[in-house]
Amino acid sequence: MTTGTAAVGTPARAEAGGAAVVPVQITGPAQKRFNLVLLGDGYTAAELPKFRADVERHLSMLWSVEPFASYRSYINVWAVEVPSKDSGVDCDPGLDAPARDTALDMGFWGGCNPGSVQRLLTVDSGKAAGYADLVPGTGRANRQIVALANSSTYGGAGGSYATASGGNALSALITPHEIGHSLGGLQDEYDYYGRGTPGGTYEGGEPSSVHHTLLTEEQMRGQQAKWWRWLGEPSESGGVIGRYEGGLYTTKGVWRPSRHSMMKTLGYAFDQVEREVMVRAISAKVDLVQDHTPNAAPIGADRTVWVDTMHPLGGELAVEWRLDGRVLRTGGARTVDLRGLDLGDPAPGRTHTLTATVTDPTPFVRDPAVRASAALTRTVSWTVDPMLTPTPETPAAEPEFTGHTPTAVPVGARSVVHADTTHPVRRTLAVRWKLDGRTVPNPGNDRDLDLGSLRLSPGTHTLTARIPGTGRELTWLVDAAPASASYELSKPLRTVHRPGRPVEYVYDAAFTMRLTARDDRKGAVVSQFRVDGDGWYTYYGWPTDAAAPFRFSPSGTVIDDLVYGKLGRSRAVPWDDATPDYGTHTVEYRTVDAAGNVGPAHGFLVTLERP
């Protein structure tokens, strides 16, 4: 199971009744973080190691997906190990399967409802909430429950709580999709409800869903509505953001932003429209300002004023200080020394207003309303009264680091690393950074260091942060060596080598591709591939067998009324265009390692000849 740095005082394992609460990743106090609580159902006591392996696999996939990758530092992860009497869950795989005695009463077919569908996997919400309540400091406002079923059958759900099968080849891809429902309120982009049956024509009004519309692109631009700000952008899930018909379980009459996103086809990314929603949803679970100089009463002009902020892995937060509305040139520093400001001549009744506005400048957000929301912008204000008696000196506390990026595991080459300190009343502690023994200039906000801006050479590096004049120092190992991957194809008709071109493999029918990832460090590696520059697609083996290679064929393979592996233009359902794309195609592949490093893309050519 993946481990992080536990908060001070957090036990490695807390027993409660028949359940055990295990901290998996702790980035801060539960009360100040978004808490992901993973429950297991249908795992007997002897099968709990299997639950731990399923948790690790699901999390490795989640951290490879944006925006979870960039905001991982906002999230605590807890596993609640609940042994069940029986192995498995109800109505798995069919309605005639024997009932199982399990802790959470999970079941397929919407809880064994003949009028439902097999893939709808539900959980007893009362029991799930009861076990999640065992995690101290968490509640409905600051957590997301994900219940994993001990099953290899495809399934999940995304209501108040997200569910997913733990052991299906695609199951780790189900989790971010269902969290998209539960946390972000995103809707399905499927053009069917019951598999194998087209959904018909949408007959309602303009959908409330942010990623479905009846409007044309011209209307979206003219009305500045829906995803007009993203139109024409290359999509994170392939193609460009535009207008694609189908969604909300209907095939016609309603449109979505991208050809295939995670909410339509598992394996692709959230597109930009969905990603913006998820950034807001995750950020709304925390406060960008974690602590600050007390402001309940006026303060004197003889001290320093400070804010402690969150620290996204994907980029630094911006802090703007103003005095009586005038912007101060602080370079984004987290501390301001009032003694260095021009406050004018002190006079009775004359006070000043100091504000610090913390904003997340992430490029994942374009809507000004989202940017200005409490999820991405927070302001703290103080009344400064120069006539107040100087703040009495207190016994000098030893300078300390109060919070930092975990040092127990390597950090990625594009991560933002942070180190917060204590706050003396009349001075500002500096943080000085060194990389491989050389000082790294970091003016302004010295609490964060963006490694991505340093363009590190491949390999490993040593990063330190210290408080000058003290013995306080932190050390991280920086992993700047992405994992590698190799491919293995089934035997081609022939192999073609041409100078200056990738190797080309020629087939006249289906062929298979196995991707094997390797890394010199612990942790799961996620492999991805794409065809002809389309969206990156997660490699998971084959839907019926995670150990089998992926199969490409001229028209795709139908499995449980979904289509997989069509070479060329993708095909998701049987009624999509099945016309074979003969000719030459480019297949690329890459890796995402446990530190978040995205490896360079490599590729080869495949030519599909007409039979």
Image (tube, rainbow, N blue to C red):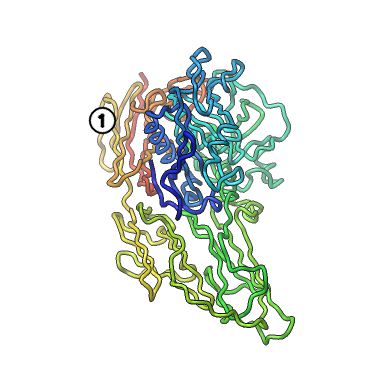
Pointer 1: what residue?
495
Which corner quadrant of the image does residue 584 belong to? top left
Q: Residues within 10 Å of mark 1 (few under 14, many from 20)?
A: some
In percent of width and height, residue 147 lies at 51, 33
- Image quadrant containing the C terminus: top left
In percent of width and height, residue 64 lies at 43, 43
**Which residue of the protein is positioned furthest toward the bottom in this rendering?**
345
Of residues 47 and 247, which is closer to you in this image?
Answer: 47
Of residues 457 and 48, which is closer to you in this image?
Answer: 48
- Image quadrant containing the N terminus: top left
Of residues 13 and 443, which is closer to you in this image?
Answer: 13
Amino acid at the residue labelled 1: Thr
Visible residue check, residue 188: no
Q: Work out whether 510 lies above or below 217.
A: above
Left or right of 516? Residue 325 is right
Which corner quadrant of the image does residue 348 belong to? bottom right
Give the secondary structure at mark 1: strand
Q: Going 64% across and 72% down the picture, which residue do you hit?
A: 354
Q: Going 64% across and 75% down the picture, which residue do you hit?
A: 299
Left or right of 346? Residue 26 is left
Visible residue check, residue 25: yes
Which corner quadrant of the image does residue 13 belong to? top left
**Which residue of the protein is positioned furthest toward the front in this rendering?**
17
Left or right of 476? Residue 8 is right
In percent of width and height, residue 236 lies at 50, 43
Of residues 111 and 254, which is closer to you in this image?
Answer: 111
Q: Going 47% across and 44% down the picture, which residue do you hit?
A: 77
Q: Work out whether 324 lies above or below 559.
A: below
